[in-house]
Amino acid sequence: MVTIGVSACPECDSRVRQDGIEHVCEQCGLILGEDRIDRGPEWRSFEDNSDSVRTGAPLTRSRHDRGLSTEIGYSLRLTGRKRRRFARLRREHSRAKFSSKAQRNQVYAFTEIRRLTGSLGLPKDIRDRACVLFESAQSARLIRGRTLEGFAAACLYATCRTTEISRTLDEIIGAARATKDELKAAYTALNRELGLQTGPIDPREYLPRYATELGLSTTIESRASTLLETAIDSGELCGRNPSGVAVASLYVVARESHERITQDQAAAVGGVSTVTIRANYYDLQDLQNQS
């Protein structure tokens, strides 16, 4: 056979095309060679990982065993004694899956973190980093006396803060199975004992999401971003709720553009009160007039 990769037929000098695994001349039909190499993915998986192997799905930090667990499946072909035998094996396998209570707590917390991540629409790297943070908190014995639901939510909130992802405390609490006090207690312990590098969130991070929820155009979003940049440079809005400042800037620009948006709508989207909207509105308007 002729070496694969030629662009012209050696018989009639016509163009060669690939038809399935064969390389065929378009003019005379001469088969030049076959390419039997499977050039598809090494494995079929919905996890993001560049390490392609044929031994199964990639490792993930969002599971206590990195995703290397083995499960005894179900089969409808088993009857009678074999079915009862495999039921016993499945039960014993489930009991032996966790070597300690700490592992069992880890499984529950990781499941809660995965649920929160999906509910809030956060990326997978945030999910994995939150699970790693929970492992660190567990190793430091910070969970004793606190709820697993509160610590799972606190780990996700702390990860959002350290990576500057725009998710407010109220948004996390709205999706979590923990109370606000439980989340705050867990977050305080994480911040105090592990020394998290958390800083203030840039209000501009909230603008795309809030503008979409309010039905505002990208032009208004861009003008609100410019207004916030001026406010941040002036230092007039330091120490304020970034969510309230962001939605107030959209409200300022929307009113100037004669968009039909109320303070109640803006407050509901930003998770703040109308008093906060009005206070930020007046300050942003004064800053805009000065510039």
Image: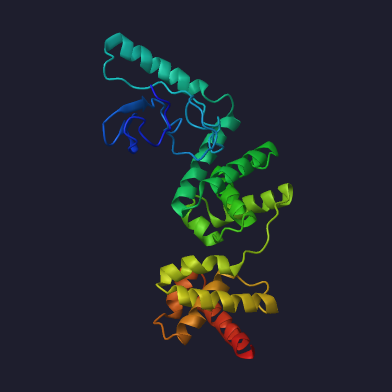
Residue 37: image location, x then y, percent:
42, 26
Residue 235 appears anywhere in the view: no
Question: In front here: 123 or 11?
Answer: 11
Picture colour scheme: rainbow
User: Where 21 sits versus 77, above or below?
Assistant: below
User: Where 195 sits versus 108, above or below?
Assistant: below
Number of labelled discs? 0
Q: Residue at x 64, y 54 (%)?
A: 162
User: Where 146 sits versus 69, above or below?
Assistant: below
Q: Residue at x 42, y 15 (%)?
A: 89
Q: Residue furthest top?
A: 81
Residue 287: image location, x then y, percent:
62, 85
Q: Residue at x 60, y 90 (%)?
A: 289
Residue 38 appears anywhere in the view: yes
Q: Residue furthest bottom?
A: 289
Residue 109: image location, x then y, percent:
54, 40
Relative placement, left or right, of 170 versus 216 is right
Question: In front here: 245 or 224?
Answer: 224
Residue 78: image location, x then y, percent:
28, 14
Quarter of the image where the C terminus is located: bottom right
Question: In front here: 31 or 291?
Answer: 31
Quarter of the image where the N terminus is located: top left
User: Where 205 sits versus 192, above or below?
Assistant: below
